[in-house]
Image (spheres, helix red, strand yellow):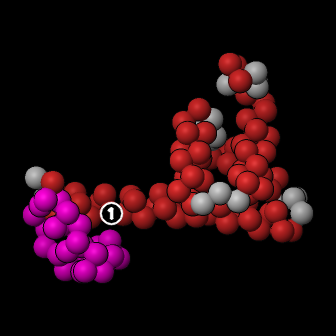
Amino acid sequence: MSKMEYTEDEKIEVKKEFLRMLVRLELDPARNRELTTFFETYLKLTDEEEYILQEEVRHLNPDEEAKVMELMTSYERKGIEKGIKKVAINLLSDGMDVPKVAELTGLSEKEITELKNQQDRND
């Protein structure tokens, strides 16, 4: 942060402006993900700071607010999906059967089978 010449107190504003910039650039989802991952590596917000950020985003003009919130929500959703798949892979590695993994994770048996096949190819 100090190398970017921002203080700890400015983290929320910096992230908000970064998200607004991404929305204005209208990049494809892959580039958005790449830039966001890089940015998140260097500017981590606490849960409380994320909450404050969301409140500040609600004060943007309605069109921009919707796009920024959609961007934030999509990354959150992707993170959750990635976590669920990681849990499914770990359960499969422990020898749990596909139907039980599907029941516990909420993924379909087809998705679990694909993960299992992927895991088998990697072993």
Residue at x 68%, y 48% (from the top left corner): 50
Q: Is residue 102 magenta?
A: yes
Residue at the (60%, 53%) spot, across then down: 32
Is any part of residue 93 visible from this angle?
Answer: no
Please state which of residues 30 and 7 is positioned toward the viewer in this rendering. 30
The residue at 82%/53% (across/down) is 56
**Identity of the residue drawn at 65% across and 57% down:** 27
- Pinpoint residue 15: horizontal percent, then vertical percent: 72, 43
Q: Position of residue 20 (x, y in %)?
A: 77, 52
Q: Magenta region, mostly helix, strand or loop?
A: helix
At which x and y percent is residue 61? Answer: 89, 63
Residue 34 colored in magenta in the image: no
Residue range (magenta):
95-121
Judging by the rendered image, the residue that carries numbered circle 1 is: 85
- Seen in the picture, residue 123 relative to 92 is either above or below; the reply is above
- Report x, y in % for residue 108: 30, 80
Q: Residue furthest top?
A: 3
Residue 35 lies in quadrant:
top right
Tell me if I can see residue 2 in this picture.
yes
Report whether 93 appears left or right of 22.
Answer: left
Other-residue count near label 1 (Cα within 10 Å), few / some / many at <14 / 14–19 / ≥20: some
Q: Amino acid at mark 1?
A: Lys
